[in-house]
Amino acid sequence: MDRVATVRDTDWEAAWASARKALSGVTEVLVPGAGEGVEIAILDWGGDGPLAFLHHANGFCAETLAPVAHALRDRFRVVAMDCRGHGDSTPVAPEGDAYHWGVLAADVERAVGATLARTGHDRVTLALGHSFGGALLLRAASLGRTPIERLLLCDPVLHRPPAPGETTAHRGSGLADATRKRRDRF
């Protein structure tokens, strides 16, 4: 048993050492989100060039995009955000519309706006989103208020728009029921 515990401890220490290296030199800033008391965490990997803005999948955080950020840093200024309730952003109780797509897209708009102001860029040249993050970047870009030049969506959660008179509650996909069973804290 002692050998198993030692191996696990060693692997854990190696994992932390690797994570610390991936985040070495990264700056974190908190910016106001869409709602009183909500702060959105933004990680800035630095880099020269046009701005690349990254958003993680549901249940993950910006740090999980470190390998992508490092790969892009030679050509871009790379930043990534934590969605509310994820990573270092404010945890928000899942009440009312706290996690409505419109509210989450407004958080993205605020995070992009703060990043543009902080970095001096006039637009996001590349917005890269994984799954849930891709859907949110697309939603924010589609509103026309967020200057995003290009989107790279990796496995985004996209559904067809409802037909005239159709509500999304009656589509029958079961996705809403499955989603309600997910954890509300990460």
Image (spheres, grey):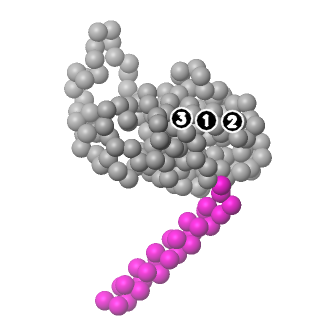
Residue for point 71% across, 45% down: 77
The reply to whether residue 73 is visible in this rendering is yes
Does the CB distance between marks 3 and 1 fall below 8 Å? yes
Between disc 2 and disc 3, whose residue precedes?
3
Residue for point 65% across, 39% down: 115
Write down the residue under mark 2: 116
Q: Is disc 2 placed on a helix, strand or loop? A: helix
Q: Which of 35 and 134 is in front in this view?
A: 35
Residue for point 37% across, 84% down: 5
Q: Is disc 3 placed on a helix, strand or loop? A: helix
In the image, 35: left or right of 73?
A: left
Point out the stretch of residues depicted in magenta.
1-27
- So how many labels did they put on this image? 3
Q: Magenta part mainly helix, strand or loop? A: helix
Marking on residue 112: 1
Q: Where is residue 63 in the image (x, y as percent from the top left)?
A: 54, 55
Type of the residue with mark 1: Val
Which image quarter holds the N terminus? Answer: bottom left
In three-dimensional space, the C-alpha distance between marks 2 and 1, rounded to whole angstroms, equals 6 Å
Q: Residue furthest bottom?
A: 2
Marking on residue 108: 3
